[in-house]
Amino acid sequence: MLTEFTVNSTLCDFVHKIHGNKKGSKVIVDIETPCEKINKFSHMEVPMTEILDIKNNYVIDRAQEAKCCSNCLVPCAVLNLCRLESGFLAKSLAKKAGSISIEFNDI
C-alpha cells in the first residue's frame, strides 16, 4: 500500500511530496521537491533494518551526503514513512495524530 506525505517546510518555503511503499525488506521512497539538496536523494531504497537507530541510519546518511540543513523536516518525514510502511509505527496512530509540527513560541 502506498503511503504519501506532504511536508511544508515553512522556514525555507518549500513543499515536498513524499511517496513510499514496502517491497520485500526495503521501503521504496520517492520525493517530489523543488529543493536541490533534497533532489540529490529523492529516490531511495531504504533497508528496513537501517531506520531504527538515529546514528546508523540510511536516510540520515543520505541527507548528510546531500548536505541538508540540520533543521530540514524531510529526513524525519521519510523516517516516519518508512516506519509506517515497515509496521514499526501504527497507521491508526498516525491517522489519529494527523500531523507533526514545530511551533516557535515566545520568539
Image (cartoon, grey):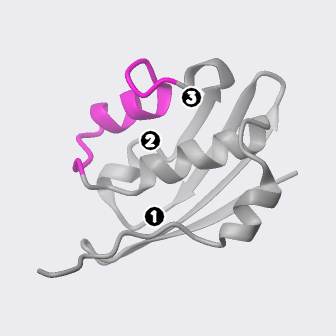
Point 32% across, 77% down: residue: 10
Q: Crowding near pointer 2: few (<14 within 10 Å), some, many (20+)?
A: some
Query: Is residue 63 rendered to the left or right of residue 26?
Result: left
Query: Is residue 100 or residue 41 the one in the foreground?
Result: 100
Q: Where residue 6 appears, x then y in whole percent?
A: 57, 70
- Cα distance between the residues tagged 1 and 3: 22 Å
Sequence-wise, the earlier of marks 2 and 1 is: 1
Q: Where residue 50 appears, x then y in whole percent?
A: 56, 21
Pointer 1 residue = 33
- Cα distance between the residues tagged 2 and 1: 10 Å
For this orientation, the residue located farthest to the left is: 107
Q: Residue 19 — which label?
A: none
Point 49% across, 47% down: residue: 42
Vertical placement of residue 18 versus 43, above or below? below
Q: Which residues are magenta?
A: 53-70
Query: Is residue 39 or residue 96 the one in the foreground?
Result: 96
Q: Secondary structure at mark 3?
A: loop
Sequence-wise, the earlier of marks 2 and 3 is: 2
Vertical placement of residue 89 versus 103, above or below? above
Point 23% across, 79% down: residue: 105
Q: Residue 51 — which label?
A: 3
Sequence-wise, the earlier of marks 1 and 3 is: 1
Q: Nearer the viewer, mark 2 or mark 3?
A: 3
Pointer 2 residue = 41
Query: Is residue 43 or residue 75 the one in the foreground?
Result: 75
